[in-house]
Image (cartoon, coloured by chain):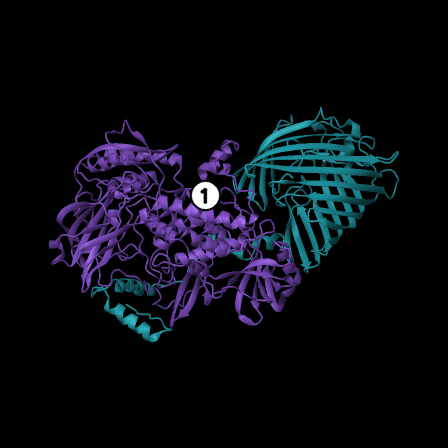
Amino acid sequence: MLLASASMAIVSVSAPRAAAPRFYADDPVTVDADMQFDASGARPLDLSEYYDFLENTFASRGDRTPIRALNVNTLEEVPDSSWFTNRIGRRPMSAQEIVRGPDRVERLEIEKWLIVRGKSPGGLQPGFLAVDPANPSQLYQLEVDPPANPEMATGAEVIGTAFYHALGYNVVDVYLVDVDPKRITISDKATIRDASGRRRFVQADLDAILEQGARLRDGRYRMSAGRFVEGEGLGNFKYYGTRPDDPNDIHPHEHRRELRANRVFAAWLNHDDSRAVNTLDMLVTAAGRTFIRHYMFDFGSILGSATRFADSPRSGHEYLLERGSSLAALLSLGLHVPPWLRRTCPDDLPPAVGCIDAETFEPARWKPEYPNAAFDNMRPDDAFWGARLVAAFSDEAIRAVVEKARFSDRRATDYLTDVLIERRDRIARAWLTAVNPVVNPRLSSEGTLTFRNAAVEARVATHPAKYAVAWSRFDNAAGTHESIAGEREVTATRAEAPGELLSGSEYIAATIRASHPEHPAWAQPVVAYFRRSPTGWTTVGLDRPFDELRSAGVLYLGGFTPRAARVVAGQPGPGLHPGFGPVRRAKFVVAAGLVLLARDCCRGHCSSARHGRHAPAWGAAEPSCHHDAWRAGSRRAGQCRPAPVSSAGRQCDGAVVAVWDGPRALCAGGLHRSPSVELARDGR
Amino acid sequence: MSCTPNTRAPVLGLAVCLATLASHPAAAQQTRAEQVQQQRQEKTTRLQPYTRSRVESFLFTLEDTLLLERVFNPPRGAFLRVGGLAEGAGFGAGPAYRASTPERVFTISSAISTRGYWLAEATFVTPRRSRWFAELRGRRRELPQEDFFGLGPHSTSNSRTNFALRDTALGGAAGMRIASWMTAGGGLEHLAPRVGRGTDGQFPSSDRLFVEATAPGLSVQPDFLRVESFVRIESTDQPLNPRSGGRYLISYQRYDDRDFDRYSFDRWEIDVQQFVPFLHGHRMLVLRGFLSTSDPRATHEVPFYLQPTLGGAYSLRGFRAYRFRDRNLLLLQAEYRWEVNPFVTGALFYDAGTVAARRGDLDVTDLKRDYGFGLRLGSAAGVALRMDIAAGSGEGARLVVRFDDVF
């Protein structure tokens, strides 16, 4: 069972619990010093595109254990590292700053270009490598737009670069340039590699590239000029495992939050080409250290662009290869028409838009061209973190970034801006409401607790009717809670800590849950930990347990038996495997039901001693005793991750709820009485 | 336990090293950072380069070196020519060599097949990227087992014979790209075909069942001077695996008998292919009409070995290759194609056609027909493998496997 409660104690290091306190003196860590050890021995790791596709499509690479991301700190945040630098997630960014992104200059003004090399074979976008003769040490990769879709790929490139930079990733700075072919010269030493080997780059090669590019009316060509960043290219990183030659790379990539949550960002921008071969590792030396910096790379096929042509309507809706839909199409002789095939790509808009919309965008169902372990491992807490970053982009900032693409037709700018705003809002609605959205808890020295509600702030949910706050004294060495004064209800995002708790406590925990009729997932408590400091209280920890089924919109209903399994409407949510097709879902319903039935549910066997290190000081919720049963169910089902079913009471009736998502059965869950049923009823 | 500090920052590295050594399990870590650093310290002892699996290595080499293109169709150097002999030749391959500059390409190639067909060919094309183009070519080939069932639409399958065809062609062509979608050109070629006894022992040689009257050109074969002109229009969205648009070709060829004044004729051909997409091109209706008419000069004949044929992988798929032949030919094909996924396309097809000695005898009410189901593997860049099962011809079901599309 994907029981976030059980993973609350999982931190980035799996040290023996008994020997390690829950919080260290330096928690929460805001910087992961993953540049300390010498990585100069690393060698280039260029991946095969074919292999990357095949292994991610047909093999289940990486660790699929549904654990919390390993590189988050105790506040559930991602520390700055060679992978990620918190930008819009940590501080407000002006639209101007977002638009500027990684760019070193506002506008790249290079009059003459000197071609020094052809592009490596394999890239889709025609182009070449060139320098400014006045500054020959700085290399740029110039690429053209397809003739049928002028401004599309280059526009996507600069938009994606700006957004990904603001989100926090390392990206290569890319500029839009209008290049006059007459001002392009070819170096005597310029070469190009083709199937017969390397040879001189000649005028005919340039002609062939320009022939495949969109030409402006004045005879020039609009191109994207990507600056070659400093360092030595080391190829790509994978979305699973670690680089075996990098001492600093210790967190399996499938368990890195910024890679898991990249699914959210990729969904927003329709970056269906987000895959290992579009990443970049650079060996850099900075401040006397040689380490690997990890980049996201190549955004020419985001939004409605497929680089050389407009995106297929499949983009974002289905993997390139899906067994179920392929069989359906084959056996039905094409009469089976998936919903995405009925999409209408806007044909009354400039071709620079390509094919993208917001109407058919369902964040939780969005898919890249093929799966990867990090995306598959994304849990609701990862998605929540990502959605907060997406929601942080204002309408004005989005428009400003789209304007950076300098589309010649205003309609393209307007349309893409509207689409990205709507997609942002859909992401916020889907993922900010799927878990308890309490964020930024603070405890003043006087004992006043304040917090914020990310979903409400993003204007995708109304204020909850009430919050319930329970207080406990936390023993950092033992990891146990001592409940103080029970649970108190408040209607605002502030509460007072009991006086007796403040005196004599080194650590305090506040358990906050919310009651909202439309968001039963908010009943899952968020636990905030505070440590006494000379100036008051410092927030040192935040646990955001979640019930995956509930996060997926499942409502638990009481009174059902396996024989009378009830179909309940629910919406798909993050964490449910996107490839979890109807047939598998149906199998899972049966398998999970059988498992639960066989175990006769838990019948009061829940105990903190057995199920984790978190004695439920807050009383209302505790780790589910169904954890093991769901694990078994998961193994049988193969795909659906175990999802927790929080049980407030100790009585389980062994009933099974089948969950139906419109025409698609989603999953199955154990059924519990008392508070969870109450919540379900609230939810209805 | 070893310590490998960042050698490019010795002081800092030493500090890190000391810190991590101090945080060895023997002494519990005091900070989160120490814990993590210890993990990294431990990893320094087991660093190793990334090693690709055999499959990954193979695929990487395939991509990085453009190996398939290098082996089968490189811009320069030696390569392997595969196929391109004639339908029914069996698997054929042979050595080839190409020398090229950005403006000119010279290719010499050869191939021999499992059924004893062989070919040697040389072409010189220049310039490559200009509005004008020119090509010189020379070819010598031997096709020892060409099927011949007799002329006309009523030939029977049990009248199958075979003959050997050797021909030598030397000529050239030139043309102009009038627009990106239109090309016009013409060519001149000296053609020297020779017919001999077929080598397929399972069936009689054509000269045993047919005579000059029933197979014109069987007894003697002249050299020909062939003049051709054509206009080609192509409006497809992508050249090798189109989803929309059309291809239209009209060509005129004049075969001039240089030896006997018996076999000169004129030929007009019209080929219309239309790709009608729906559901964004993921479903398609593909239509083709092909008409070939040959008009011999007065008292002349069209040699049977130069007559257009029906049957085989590219026309009537339910019939053997070369099943029907005559001076005039009409072929109508329709395919419904649906995308199973980006790599597999399904097809339902229907072929119909006929041949006739006179154009007016092309009877559209009495067409030879077949239908079937097919799968095509490939991508937008082209069809890599085609498997069609055709039936309804009355001559048994046939499996067609090819490495290209039907049209």
Front-most of B305 and A14?
A14
Residue A683, image quadrant: top left
User: Which quadrant is the N terminus of chain A positioned in?
Assistant: top left
Q: Residue furthest bottom?
A: B11
Q: Going 71% across and 55% down the picture, which residue do you hit?
A: B130
| Element carrying mark 1 | loop
Q: Going 30% across and 51% down the picture, which residue do you hit?
A: A68
Q: Which residue is mark 1?
A: A358
Work out whether residue B36 can be spotted: yes
Spot the purple chain and give its letter. Answer: A
Spot the cyan chain and give its letter. Answer: B
Q: Is residue A244 left or right of residue A348?
A: left
Q: Is residue A87 above or below residue A599?
A: below
User: Which quadrant is the C terminus of chain A positioned in?
Assistant: top left
Q: Is residue A667 left or right of residue B393?
A: left
Work out whether residue B52 can be spotted: no
Task: Name the residue type under label 1.
Answer: Ala
Front-most of A317 and A464?
A464
Residue B27, image quadrant: bottom left
Q: Residues within 10 Å of mark 1 (few under 14, many from 20)?
A: some
